[in-house]
Image: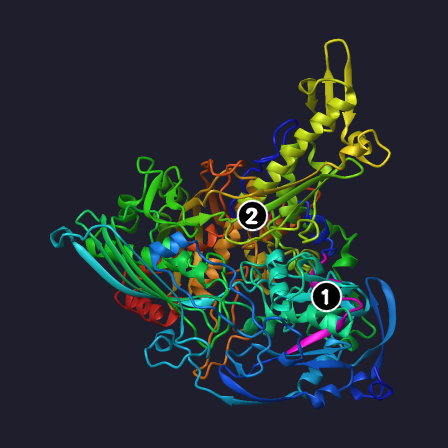
Amino acid sequence: MSAPPPRVTHGPGEPYVGTSVPRVEDQRLLDGRGRFLADLAAGALSVVFLRSTEAHAVIESIDTTRATDMPGVVGVYTGNDLPLARDYIGSLHTPDPGFVAATGFRMPEQRLAILPVDRVHYVGQPVVALVASDRYLGEDALEAVDITYRPLPAVLDPSASLAPDAAPIHPHLPDNEAGRIEVEFGDDVAADAVAVTVEGTYRIGRHGAVPLEGRGVLARVDGQRVSVWTSTQIPHLVRQGICEATGWSVDAVRVVVPDVGGGFGTKANVYAEEVVVPVLARLTGHDLVWVEDRQEHLVGSAQGRDQVHRTRLSVDREGRVLRWEDDFLLDIGAGGLWVAGVVANTAIHLLGPYRIPRVRLRGRAAFTNKTITAQYRGAGRPEACFALERSLDDAAGRLGITPVEIRRRNLLTAADLPYAQPLPYRDGVPIVYDGGDYLRCLDSVLELLPAETVERLAAEHPDLTIGHGVGCYIEATGRGSFESGRVRLTSTGGFEVASGAASAGQAHETVFAQVAADGLGCSLELVTVRRSDTDLVRHGVGTFASRSAVLAGSAIRRAAEQLLDQATGRAAQLLGVSPDLVKSTASGFAAADGSSEWEISWADLATACAPGGAQEQLGPLDVVEYFHPETVTWTMGAHAAVVGVHRGTGAVSVLSYAVAHEGGVEINPQVVEGQVIGGVAQGIGGALLEQFRYSPTGQPTSTTLAEYLLPGTCDVPDVQVRHLGVATPCNPLGVRGAGESGTIAVSATVAGAVEDALHGLVRVSETPIRTGPLRAAAEQIRREGQ
Amino acid sequence: MTVEDAFSPLAQRVPLATTVNGRPVTLAVPARLTLADLLRDELHLTGTHLGCEHGVCGACTVLVDGRSVRSCLLFAVQVEGRSVVTVEGLQDHPTTGRIKCAMARHHGLQCGFCTPGMLVTATELIDRHPPEKPLDEACVRETMSGNICRCTGYQGIVRAVLEAAADPATGTTHEG
């Protein structure tokens, strides 16, 4: 195992940003004193959900009589029993009109019922909610709910779903198209310039976030208000979803985020359960909790990926890309509140980190009778990357140059950057890659993991045939529209920081404290970051799309700086000196005029602001700031993998992995590295192991963790990471997002390495990579004694 | 609950006497209550987490008579007369203390949900490892393979366990 990189430690008087200060979160989590959703359940009655057993069916009847009479049951509720203003949850993202105009983007309004009463659209869809004294009795009683379904044909193939004669799955819509996009630019390419054209069909399997903690919702009613604790990444959007569905005022709903055991996008969604539990709490007057179990999670929580790309790539004799065409199809299942995001992300990231003069992309999203989808880590980027990178490898092979060489000839360099694309981003702002030198990432990753590593590892693993692969990606990070940051001086002279960007393991309590302490010029120990709570910041968006460091970090920095500015004025007033004589110190302020010196601590200032203090009339020092980025900032990286294919079984082992990425300023380098390495692990899962499978009738067959395989300790190698920071002027911290970078290029990189290991005898065009064809190729190599 | 409910066979309780984190526990539990639910719901020891409730993820790992078990797969009544130790009960255990420090140093946790199970498994690995066998990276990876982490990619966890396994006096590993 390689030695860990030296830790960037914090020295006296230095800024905290850029140093790997220890995580504030660790102590309580290590001691088993984290407070996750299920840990808050004491005293609440249990809500359990009866979920559809049919992929597509008409509900003919629901009879809850027997269940209502079961022991411990408080009540049984169908959609008809819920007092809702609107029985569905609205879209979470609508692209800017400029983007829509440039790309022909279209999507219909989705109205998947919160608890359907007439029709079900996927196995796992919640249909009946039952309140019981405990979960055991509740689940017993669910078995006594009588539902009669009249099955309808289940549509599982997105192409069939979009066929002109296909019956619409959602009766309010004319067809099954969930979204469409079209991007075209550049001049036609002269036929004689083209040396090689490769065509391919690439499938990215249906897999998803599967955080170790499932979802869960706790609701407590207090007078006219409902407080909702939910394991989410987006508390303010959950509040919005609850209010839109119920008609309640935002002032009547508080959403609080406890410790969250991983999110990765599936918890950046608003779910029926998040509406139903607070509604039933109000209806019954009881505190209620629902804790998702793993089986529910694997059928009921939003999934991801599931795309097919039909591609055509033309290059000249030197391997320079001339033309890139892709017709892609997304299967969003029965619904996806982020369909606009995933469709647009896929199209935009198909442009890659390369010079591509002529582009023609068409994408369509289809409704099917599979589980709903959301934005799983990468959200269109890994799929786009797989299609483009696989096509580049194919073209390189035809030209007789290496995968490294074809990328070297096409990657944007310092001479090209910043690089404008003739297309607006989703926010309507023209795309400009604000990077430094993308080719440098490729060179760098090859230093970390050169192709020659194959020889050494081949000697160590005689049972494996070994190969090397590379992949590059681009990622738009830190998108708007805004995020909130609040910094306030507490009554004891400390600081409390809050933001709409909820943490699900990304160390916000640590990194936002670093940002605030630098802005305040104070010691880190004075700063406490609170978990997200809509009562602490009234407006917010959430954590997803590699945006929290960029947006929440920037909002917190500005709030801290403003607070310092206000406090400096107040300190000067208290000291009776001119503000320009006042300097901030780690513990407060000091002033000197040559003959005298004064000091005032933050605690003194807090006392002065409090009732009875000298500055009571000025009110508390409490600043809320909203940061609106002008547009996204771009991260780029290169991955390299060495894999071994077992000669007997075809099983793939990732033996060594490296990432070189061009991020921005790192607030906490160890946290960033952790995000990248964890992202690679999830990428390996998607490349080799994970898939939500369905039977021909739409029954999910990956309903335990013994069937949906998450990567374990023996599946993920040591990952080397090199950070090539290029500060961006797009935000006051100079940071770029890093949460998704690790995941994006993994499938493409591993696929390239597998092909190399098998001497090009197989083409890998889908994930998870099937071992059958690999075994046959490995056998052929063994027979031929290669 | 109605009077009738209280006589339901589902509500029938079985007496249980066991030891949890060194303290005797005597109570009556439904026969079908899992050990994990006993710990979490009845004894409020919420450090033991439930990640799958079907014995795959390892988040609910606790020690019963010193050996790691999945508390989601045991009924509470199965620990009659036994000694159960949860992550809370390892608070002052020196091996666990070393692992915790190393986990923080090596960024071996992000969301922290798998962490209690990891700590229990790693504590057993180090405390009960036969001295003649090397406690190297392969051994750590194999032994910890029943504990899933979705955040970290395991690198920091493996480094932390190896570091904690090093002899605290000499700083050398069992390998040496």
Identify which residue is drawn at 83% across, 29% down: A614
Q: Is residue B90 left or right of residue A255?
A: right
Identify which residue is drawn at 77% across, 15% down: A597
Q: Position of residue A768 (x, y in %)?
A: 42, 67
Residue A445 drawn above or below residue A214: above
Q: Position of residue A365 (x, y in %)?
A: 39, 67
Tell which of B165 and A504 is nearer to you: A504
Residue B19 drawn above or below residue A721: below
Q: Secondary structure at mark 1?
A: strand
Question: Numbered disc 2: what chain?
Answer: A
The stretch of residues the image draws in magenta is A35-49
Question: Would you call the spot at circle 1 few (<14 residues within 10 Å), some (14-19), or many (20 or more)?
Answer: many
What amino acid does circle 2 point to?
Answer: Ser
Residue B145 drawn above or below residue A498: below
Question: Of the numbered discs in the image, which one, if any, rests on residue A43?
Answer: none
Q: Position of residue A160 (x, y in %)?
A: 35, 78
Residue to which mark 2 is pinned: A548
Q: Could you tell me how far apart the alpha carbons at marks 1 and 2 are, in whole angstroms?
A: 26 Å
Q: Is residue A38 magenta?
A: yes
Tell which of A236 and A5 is nearer to you: A236
Q: Is residue A115 magenta?
A: no
Contact between marks 1 and 2 (CB within 8 A): the answer is no
- Quick check: can you spot residue A705? no
Question: Would you call the spot at circle 2 few (<14 residues within 10 Å), some (14-19), or many (20 or more)?
Answer: many
| Residue that extends furthest to the top in the rendered view of this protein | A595
* Quadrant hosting residue A114: bottom right
Respond whether the residues carrying marks 1 and 2 are from the same subunit.
Answer: yes
Residue to which mark 1 is pinned: A219
Tell which of B118 and A160 is nearer to you: A160
Question: Numbered disc 1: what chain?
Answer: A
Quadrant of the drawing holding the C terminus of chain A:
bottom left
